Amino acid sequence: MTSTLQGDGSAITDAAGSFQIEGIPPTIHDPRFGPRPPNRIAAHHPDRGVAPQRDLPEVDTTIDLVLLATGGVDGEVVGTAKYDWIIAGPTSAQGQSERVDLQRDGTFRFESCPSETTS
């Protein structure tokens, strides 16, 4: 529900990998609220990988999203942990972070790491 209220949309590709999302509202520029982040698009497949998040232009366009396989990370926090979770994110400003729970024994696992935008 939160996703819908924030204006998120999703689509499932056809057999050829094509998809269409219609009715994406333009980014609202209101000086009272300061700069607003642009609309973004990304793709995720549980077996084939992710297409990094990227900004959407404000005009109708065709965008190619390429799924990239990413590796996972197993880790362990040594000593007392300050939080109950771990976050991994791309080193660039583009991309989306992932969060996993820290287990009681201090271990954590990212099944696949977030990837960076390569455009």
Image (cartoon, rainbow, N blue to C red):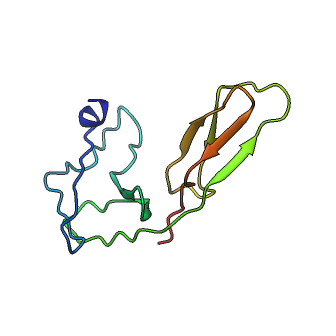
Residue drawn at 37 percent across, 33 percent down: 33
Asked whether, in this view, residue 119 is left or right of residue 105, the answer is: left
- Tag count: 0
Where on the picture, by quarter, is residue 15? bottom left
Residue sitting at the far left: 23
In the picture shown, does residue 78 fall above or below 73?
A: above
Image-quadrant location for residue 70: bottom right
How far from the left and from the top, in percent, is residue 50? 44, 61
Residue positioned 42% across, 65% down in the render: 48
- The residue lying toward the viewer, choosing from 92 and 46, is 46
Image location (x, y in percent) of residue 11:
22, 55
Side of 24 where 35 appears, left or right: right
Q: Residue at x 24, y 47 (%)?
A: 9
Residue 99 against residue 63 in the figure, above or below: above
Quarter placement of the N terminus: top left
Q: Where is residue 115 in the image (x, y as percent from the top left)?
A: 54, 60
Nearer to me, 87 or 95: 87
Location of residue 41 in the rendering, given as x and y in whole percent from the top left corner = 34, 56
> Which residue is pictured at 21% across the width and 75% down the height?
16
Compared across the picture, whether 20 is left or right of 2 comes to: left
